[in-house]
Image (cartoon, coloured by chain):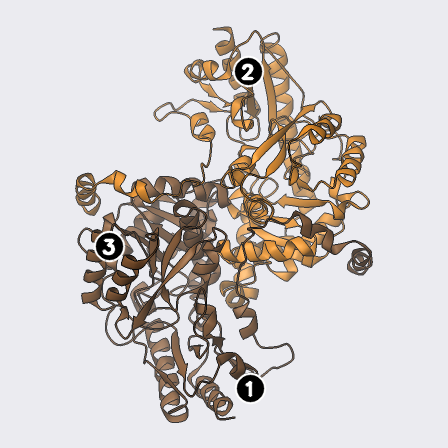
Chain colours: A brown, B orange
Amino acid sequence: VTTRAVDGVRQTTDARGFARWLSESRDPGLSGALEEGAPPPGTADIISMAAGLPAPELFPLEALSAAFARAFRDDGPSCLQYGSPRGLPALRVLVCQQLAARGVVATPDEVMITTGSSQALDLLGRVLLDAGDTVAVEAPTFPGALDAWRSRSPRFLTVPLDDDGLVVEALEEALRTAPEPPQFLYTLPTFQNPAGVCLSAHRRVDLLELSAKHNLLIVEDDPYFDLWYDQPSPPPIRALMDARKHVIYVGSFSKILAPGLRLGYVVADRAVMKHLLRAKAAADLHSVGIVQSALLALYTSGDFDALAHRALVRDLYRARRDAVCAALEVHVQGGATWRRPRGGFFVWLELAGGVRADSLMPRAKTAGMSFLSGRAFYPYAGGEHALRLSFSPSSPPRLISGVQRLAQAIAA
Amino acid sequence: VTTRAVDGVRQTTDARGFARWLSESRDPGLSGALEEGAPPPGTADIISMAAGLPAPELFPLEALSAAFARAFRDDGPSCLQYGSPRGLPALRVLVCQQLAARGVVATPDEVMITTGSSQALDLLGRVLLDAGDTVAVEAPTFPGALDAWRSRSPRFLTVPLDDDGLVVEALEEALRTAPEPPQFLYTLPTFQNPAGVCLSAHRRVDLLELSAKHNLLIVEDDPYFDLWYDQPSPPPIRALMDARKHVIYVGSFSKILAPGLRLGYVVADRAVMKHLLRAKAAADLHSVGIVQSALLALYTSGDFDALAHRALVRDLYRARRDAVCAALEVHVQGGATWRRPRGGFFVWLELAGGVRADSLMPRAKTAGMSFLSGRAFYPYAGGEHALRLSFSPSSPPRLISGVQRLAQAIAA
């Protein structure tokens, strides 16, 4: 009743009145790509290959539930109180231990816990970017990063990718010809979103040398590090000798545990960390205490076998990667080109014959599947003839059907 | 061992090297007031009256723990997955029901769940403020709000308070003489932080009329609504007729449940909400799903008596308010003036005889208590001879000792 009455009131008020108060530089926000990729209401059997959702059957539900119970029991009042913007000290120690296993050496005071790695990107924008600054990004790149920084109205300098990841020579050329040097390079070196490529070990060294030579700060976003399916990921750029001078590292528990926990972290030199902490305090004071405590309990209780869980995660996604790639070979040959990803969640398709992904989308939906159009992954033009398939959330049979439907749409 | 080795490395690197990458407009962040108010390490028996921490003995630990268990059981996989920036639909319905009890009529699509009400303030800054815009604030006001908006480099227009809250005539005068009209007025009408005053019902009407006349947007921050000790709080400004056209309302579960959950909300017209949702998606995608689900479970399970809990909360803080005010009467007469707050967490003291709060602070610490210096609550100069006492986190005997120690410091 209340709702109805309110709706009545609402329609009599001037909805556009509020628009006059909006900031001119208000966040332009998400490109709408995710909503476009979502199935239209009423279409039950759309196979979504649009959003990069982790597989919910992998969420360690019982272990997490037990970890929350333990966090309440052992740490209740203190983690329900206001806390530090840095995050729980013991959780930052745990992050350092997990990083050490990746070859990344960091001290707990170089780590800040964030509300998902999205927030780390947002806070880095606040701390590193002035209006109109330049940011170098891979093309294609993660739209969430572009969105996080757009409120600073940056100029994006795009650097192409090939089979071995970011083309370091192209970056060098871009640095030479750019009207002003970028404030930083944003890179997803390992199983890149959306391209699926992995920066080769050799190029990692080249990139770091280039960074030293040009005094270029690197923001390394590494959510897919643990999700390798053929051979272990190469060490992060931040793990290389002297990288701590030039690399800020962003990590996440979203892909390996559960994204709804909104737990990520950023590793930065103390000089940057000081400002990140202030930005974090101004943004949301700190991330949820009980969630931090539960994560710590999960990894330290002995009930949860983190190694076995990672293996399980890899096995499930590997089977999905294999299914989608096999189906592409069978059904989409000639209609598109792609690279077989060695990790991560995504296959990037370049459509053949000048087919535009936006034109393909309604046909794909009619056929019963969805994808993300490539243009969402470019700050300006680009990606019109490309699309991203996410294989993470669906079973192999559904992935195979999804690819068959895509092939139908391409053929139509 | 790792930590030590790393520290060795760190000292050989150029810590200041990173400074060259920092944004010029990086968030200047917290004034440092909270850290100043914290007891120095090694002083065990400092009675802290600095931070406005809720009393941890009021956290409904068992009920919350059960609510999390229930959330995992009933809603596990879905609330561990990525979610909507709006927040859980059922939680937004619950917020609307709680708001209805305050006289505030809102629909679920006018509500967004935020990572604490701090984040609501931050997102409002992103959506409403361009660099250099003016914001009208009460003087004194909540430093967290100033910090949230400082990255936009706003000009602050200050409006004085008296026993009945914000002086509406002074605001009108300020609007008339300001070089440019403020983008919005930020007000904490009910048991204001730090002044403790409550905007009278009469002035609420006057303020809303002024807002309509001057086309002034009001951001009403209302974390202390339920914390009245003498008589129920007057309805929020947002509850007044036609207020929905001019008022954005911010609420929080931090004071009534637990701040570490980081759950707040913002109520705004759909035209503003559209932009708030984009800003939220760019900031942290969404607030933690399992925490939202647990909050919902807490209020809907039947195991938690929300009314009885509110009464318990009021009784405990009322006793503390009474203790601190009685002690001030006995020990600080002549040394300062103050108003007896009728709700909230704070007593605001104006020191007599030109005593500066900053000079008093070291003496207070030596005597064994701490407070926040008044200047933290003003955007520019102001508050030098004032201080804020928080009575929320300490028992009556400790509050009495705290005030005795303060009196000692004033006398010294």
Q: Are marks 2 and 1 on the same chain?
A: no
* Residue A268 image label: none
Q: Which is nearer the eye, B364 or A215?
A: A215
Which residue is the site of mark 3? A211
Q: Which is nearer the eye, B191 or B240?
A: B240
Q: Disc 2, disc 1: CB below 8 Å?
A: no
Pinpoint the chain carrying mark 2: B
* Disc 3 to disc 1, C-alpha distance: 44 Å
Neighbours of disc 3 within 10 Å: few (<14), some (14-19), many (20+): many
Q: Secondary structure at mark 2?
A: loop
Q: Is residue A14 in sight in this rendering?
A: yes
Vertical position of residue A83 compared to residue A104: above or below:
above
Residue B77 place in picture, x, y as percent:
50, 67
Pinpoint the chain carrying mark 3: A
* Residue A363 image label: 1
Q: Nearer the viewer, mark 2 or mark 3?
A: 3
Amino acid on which the number 2 mark rests in the picture: His
* Residue B385 image label: 2
Q: Are marks 3 and 1 on the same chain?
A: yes
Left or right: A155, with A93 as reference point: right
Residue B84 place in picture, x, y as percent:
56, 62
* Disc 2 to disc 3, C-alpha distance: 51 Å
Neighbours of disc 1 within 10 Å: few (<14), some (14-19), many (20+): some
Amino acid on which the number 1 mark rests in the picture: Arg
Amino acid on which the number 3 mark rests in the picture: Ser
Q: Disc 2, disc 3: CB below 8 Å?
A: no
Query: Which of the image's four quarters has the N terminus of chain B?
Result: top left
Q: Secondary structure at mark 3?
A: helix
Neighbours of disc 2 within 10 Å: few (<14), some (14-19), many (20+): many
Q: Which is nearer the eye, A392 or A93?
A: A392
Q: Nearer the viewer, mark 3 or mark 1?
A: 3
Residue A200 place in picture, x, y as percent:
22, 69
